Image (tube, rainbow, N blue to C red):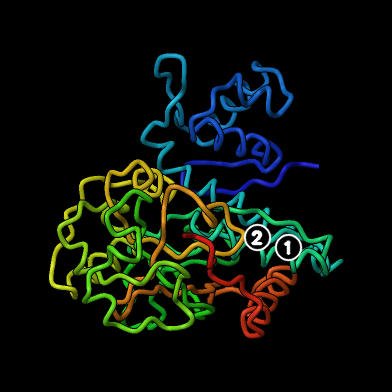
Amino acid sequence: MRPMTFRHKMYELQSSIVDTDVLRWFKQVAEGATVTEVSELEMVTQSGVSRALARLEQEVGTPLLEKSGRTLRLTGAGQVFKPHVDRALAQLRGGLDAVAQFISPETGTVAVAFPQSLGSWLVPDLLGSFRAAHRDVAFRLTHVRDELHGLPLDGGAADLEIGTRRFRTDLREMRPGDLLVHIKQIATEPLRLALPRTHRLASPEAVPANSADSPISATSAVPGLPGIRLADVATEPFIALRTGSALRKLGDDLCQAAGFRPRVVFEGDDLSNVRGLVAAGLGVAIVPAPRAGSPVAGAGPVLYPPILDAGAERSIYLTWPADRALLPAAELFRAHVIDMVTAGHIRPVSAAST
């Protein structure tokens, strides 16, 4: 049978030549893999990968890759071509998933994006309780930063996002490039002041009187260590995430409301870096409250007294696409998340972090 030919201006693409293998290999090379690494990963000879990429360039009608030392990099045409390859492969993967889940709704793969700070308690708890009832559903997990201006759903690659960013949903407020999403608040997370254990405020007797005058709610109190007002640490060096982070902005806003601008002496890429610098005695930090049983809960070099200032908390949201229906497995997990938090099945804040 003569292969189907698609005509577009001066180019002809024969469907019998351009296959998904070579598109996948092109994507891998374009993202930094060497031909040797692709051949080992795909169990194909290096010459086979090279010939396939050459055939792809011949079909497109122009070079897509060029040598740069021992690696290949995208040409200008390759940079134009790659986003379309990404979308084509994603659409194919989505189609295969849709068919598989149509045949068996209790199977499939759910792509979930979340920030690192929720990966030590909330996300594992939700995955564990879901998998207890749906063992044939698999998950593809992706870390995303809590950047204020980042796109939701890992740029559209994830089915669901469990995170702390509240994305725009009002069409009148949306900007070019924004993704259409639904969003639901599922929890509120208290914030704490991370102190090195050797800090002057690390004992109840050392807390300034103006902090002791303020009541500590039963839900936020930490046994053995009173809460602290941010004004009490206005002259301390601060450690924070980089500017652009939602948590960084929340911390800066809290300090501004307390009457000062924090003197940030170290900026980290993630909260584990921030906590490590606090443990070394290099400053204090505003961080989410440790959860019971999480790696940072319990006795250690860092203490986490409650922050008494109003608004010392952050919201946690569930986000999913508004422009497409979720596949059955993803919809099952979305419903499970909402059911779990509605029933109050969320791990409590640790009371042993002092």
Task: Report which residue position mark 1 lands on.
Answer: 128
Who's the residue at 54% across and 46% down the image? 85
User: Which residue is pictured at 64% across the width and 23% down the height?
Assistant: 49
Q: Quadrant of residue 122?
A: bottom right
Image label count: 2
Q: Amino acid at mark 1?
A: Gly
Question: Marks 1 and 2: CB-CB under 8 Å?
Answer: yes
The answer to which of 9 and 342 lies nearer the viewer is: 342
Residue 66 image offset from top left, x and y in percent: 42, 23
Q: Residue at x 19, y 69 (%)?
A: 231
- Percent position (x, y) of residue 259? 13, 72
Give the distance between the C-alpha atoms of the residues marked 1 and 2, in whole angstroms.
6 Å
Residue bearing mark 2: 124
In terms of secondary structure, where does tag 1 sit?
helix
Type of the residue with mark 2 = Pro
Q: Residue at x 32, y 76 (%)?
A: 308
